[in-house]
Each structure stands twice: as C-alpha cells, then as structure tokens.
C-alpha cells in the first residue's frame, strides 16, 4: 500500500477533529493508528474509506487520488473493506446473507456467485456451521468475524479496521485478532485503529500516534514503542502499557 495524505483537516462544530494531517508511506503492508480517545483516529479512517468528507486536504492511495465527489466516492467505497467496532450486521439476515447482500446489490454478483464466495469465506475462516444463524444467535466474536469476512468478500484493495475488538471480552478478542493476523499473513493491506498495544506491536509495520487531531509521531514498531521521540508518545505508552 502506498499512502499519501496532505494537509487533511476535518472540523466539527468548530473543533478540529483532524488538524492539517500529512503523511507519506511509500510501501507499507500494515499501518496501526494508536492514541488517546478523541484524537482523530476514527475520523481519519472514515475519510480514507470515503465515509466522511474532509474540509480540506488530499488523499492518494496507490497513486490514485481519492476524489471527494459523490459518484467518485461510490466507486472508491467499492474498493475498500471497512470493519467497525459495532459489527454493523443486518439483524434480520443470516450470516451467509450478510455477506451475499452487498455482493449482489452493490457489486453486481449473481445470487449463485455471491453465495459461492460467501460459503468459501465461511469455510476458510471456520465459520461454515454458523452460515444460517442470525446475528443475535452468534457470539460477539463470531459477529465480528462475519463482518470481517463480508469486508474481504469484495476483494478490496485496502481493509480498514476501526477498534474491531473494543466491545468484546478477552476470549472473543483473541478470536478476532487471530483472524486479522491471518489476513496479514495472506498479504492483505490494512489500516487498523486499536487499543490493543500488544497486538499493535506484533502486527504493525508502521505505527502512527494521533492526539488532538494531529499525528504526534510515526515510525516503525521499534521506534514508537522502544524509542519514542515525543514526550506525548512516551506518556501515552507509559499509561496504556502499565496494566
């Protein structure tokens, strides 16, 4: 993944959720965003995914600019797989149907083709026995794994994970993190927002710490976790790694 962000800003009710953020990554497989709550991580992820409009600034992914015009954004969203902390599954549909519906309605697959892709993914991630279950019949970890399978079913060029384990207990968290780790090993490019610092250290190639709408520091895992240059980074890590 090649990612370039230039002077990106987003303002809500006079508050800078993002304040002239810029970064350049020539080639990175996994970027992890960390930092205090309200620092701008989720806003940045949503703008990259085309779910929010910036007030100013530019984004380029793999040398292709993201055009913040509705028709262009519809095309862009079809190339991005996004997984939210709240699962966002349709409660009245089965696990299988939650995967096939966007394939049919958004990406133009036939019902047979969509079902084949969905069943293949459910089998690949050992979820096939849950295919007919509705979200209410699944554990939180299973619901999130179904959401991840749906995100990758569209063959995205980039995956975005926004705190995918924040509402899960430790056992379910482990299930989801194992699935994300498997996706990394398959060579998929993604950006992950997480509060799981141990997992961030294990999976990231690059780490960026956001606070107050700005990128305070960005670098390799070793640099950020072992030799942070910023006092704010050191203080944040001292707090979150204490427990």
Image (tube, helix red, strand yellow):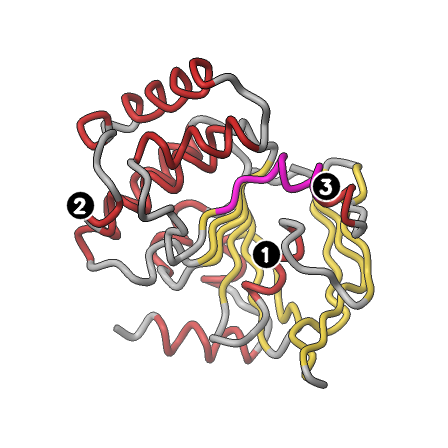
Q: Residue furthest bottom?
A: 14
Cβ–Cβ under 8 Å for marks 3 and 1: no
Q: Is residue 118 above or below residue 11?
A: above
Which quadrant does the N terminus fall into? Answer: top right
Mark seen at residue 45: 1
Precedes in sequence: disc 3 or disc 1:
1
User: In the rendered view, does 79 fall on the left or right side of 123?
Assistant: right
Q: Look at discs 1 and 2 and give the one toward the viewer.
A: 2
Name the quadrant containing residue 100.
top left
Precedes in sequence: disc 1 or disc 2:
1
Does the stretch in magenta take in 145? Answer: no
Q: Is residue 48 above or below residue 179?
A: below
Percent coordinates x, y for residue 227 in the rendering: 51, 64
Mark seen at residue 61: 3
Residue at position x 52%, y 73% in the image:
233
Mark seen at residue 137: 2
């Amino acid at each position: 993944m090649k990612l370039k962000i230039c002077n990106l800003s987003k303002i809500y009710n006079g508050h800078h959720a993002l304040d002239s953020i810029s970064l350049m990554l020539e080639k990175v497989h996994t970027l992890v965003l960390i930092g205090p709550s309200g620092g701008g991580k989720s806003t940045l992820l949503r703008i990259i995914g085309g779910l929010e409009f910036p007030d100013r600034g530019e984004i380029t992914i793999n040398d292709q600019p993201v055009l913040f015009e509705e028709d262009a954004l519809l095309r862009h969203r079809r190339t991005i797989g996004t997984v939210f902390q709240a699962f966002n599954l349709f409660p009245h549909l089965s696990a299988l149907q939650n995967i096939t519906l966007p394939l049919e309605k958004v990406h133009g697959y036939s019902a047979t083709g969509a079902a084949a892709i969905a069943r293949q993914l459910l089998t690949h991630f050992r979820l096939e026995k849950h295919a007919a279950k509705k979200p209410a019949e699944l554990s939180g970890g299973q619901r999130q794994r179904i959401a991840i399978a749906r995100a990758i079913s569209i063959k995205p060029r980039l995956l975005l994970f926004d705190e995918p384990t924040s509402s899960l207990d430790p056992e379910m968290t482990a299930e989801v993190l194992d699935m994300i780790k498997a996706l990394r090993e398959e060579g998929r490019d993604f950006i992950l927002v997480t509060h799981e610092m141990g997992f961030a250290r294990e999976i990231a190639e690059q780490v960026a710490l956001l606070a107050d709408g700005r990128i305070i520091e960005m670098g390799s895992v070793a640099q950020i976790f072992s030799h942070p240059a910023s006092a704010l980074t050191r203080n944040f890590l001292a707090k979150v790694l204490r427990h």
